[in-house]
Image: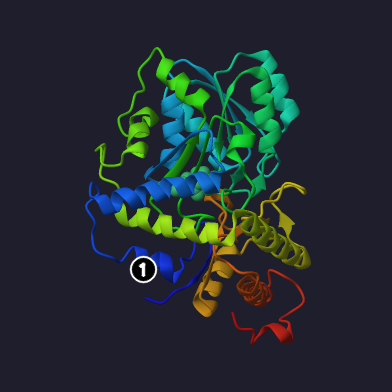
Amino acid sequence: MEDKLLLIPGPTNLTPRVREAMAGPQLPHVGSQFYSMFKETVALARYVFRNEKGVQFVFTGSGTIGMESSVVSLVAHGDRTLTLMNGYFGHRMLMLNQVHGAHADSIDHPNGEAADPDALRSQLQKNRYSVVFMTHVDTSSSVVNPVEELVEECQKAGVLSVVDSVCAIGGVPLDFDRLGADIVFTASQKALAGPPGAVLVAASQQAIEFMEKRKDPIESYYMNLLRWKPIMDDPRMYLATPATQVIMALREAMMEVKEEGIENRWARHRKLGEMTRSQVEEWGQRFVAEEGHRADTVTSFWVQKENAGEIQGTLEKEHGIMIARGLYEERDKMLRIGHFGILTTETLRGALDDIDLVMRETGAVAGGVKATTSDKKR
Ligand SMILES: Cc1ncc(COP(=O)(O)O)c(C=O)c1O
């Protein structure tokens, strides 16, 4: 099967090393070899989250399991929670709160507008909430929220905070210990450049104590973080069979993150973001996310001609590049370029030139095909 350049907001391309990690012999999940590899995986997860003080979890599941396990582990029926919404994943977080019986309030920002710490402060003064949920980068709108300020408001009000950092960790700066949020989670297939299938969660000691002292039991077997806690210390204990190949590949991917250095990785993503944004500006298309709050991992923009499908299809067929469209009713109107993981600035430059060509060929950008772009190689 031919490899395509994945510029969708996850999953992303894998290095040969990561792919090889999945192709080895099947290991028993309770054997000594997997045991030590798993312990290394948890230690590497601590490195990428900068989590020395809290509890670190890695287990099988997609990012949605991170969302739902934080809801179910912290929220009991009837608890009053607040979700900050400015894109599809904020809506999903609200829905999960409703599914699990919370009295779920929200602050509804228009898609692409960053969550406002002042609005959060005044909402926290109006009602007593148990937990505030927020998205770090909402992949649908590519807005990056000011999580430091938002978490600070929660801390001042004595409210637990949960940050969905699925589309950020590894590509956007985050320091779990300094941030002071109670739960932060991500998934393997985004900026960490592993295959899909593992969820990584960091929880503060305060969050763990809160779960331990809850009056109502946590209403889940698999998504109960307290059940996973002892497994992180001794993975030979059995809770559910881990996707061993995925965990081994994630370990390899995070070793690559460490070799690059997390700060260097953030700086590379900053450049990838800047390059993509300046290209969108050159095309004269409108960003979905407001200025000053555009993520370095994904860029969403409105396509004036509403021919996102044509552009996406042509790019895949003629250039082997996959980009994403908007979600649901925004499918034709929006394009999203994912730029994270192992992507280099050179590869991105070549790909942006190819996208430029297709944007012009399909009439999404006025001005015809630039002579210089036609024979660029990735
Ligand atoms: C911000 C955000 N949160 C949660 C999720 C859900 O993750 P998954 O699709 O791995 O379940 C995604 C997926 O793209 C995401 O971008």
Q: Quadrant of residue 306?
A: bottom right
Residue occupying image coordinates x 64% and y 76%:
350
Q: Is residue 126 left or right of residue 316?
A: right
Q: Which residue is mark 1?
A: 20
Q: Is residue 105 left or right of residue 153?
A: left
SS at mark 1 in the image: helix
Q: Residues within 10 Å of mark 1 (few under 14, many from 20)?
A: some
Task: Please determine whether, in this image, residue 105 is positioned above or below residue 285.
Answer: above
Residue occupying image coordinates x 35% and y 18%:
217
- Residue 377 x, y percent position in the rendering: 60, 83
Task: Please determine whether, in this image, residue 248 is positioned above or below residue 125.
Answer: below
- Residue 154 x, y percent position in the rendering: 64, 24
Residue 195 is at least partly visible in this image? no
Task: Please determine whether, in this image, residue 174 is positioned above or below residue 127.
Answer: below
- Residue 230 x, y percent position in the rendering: 34, 32
Identified by mark 1, the residue type is: Glu
Pick the residue in front: 377 or 44.
44
Q: Quadrant of residue 262?
A: bottom right
Count of residue discs: 1
* Cβ of mark 1 under 8 A from ligand 1: no
Pick the residue in front: 378 or 242.
242
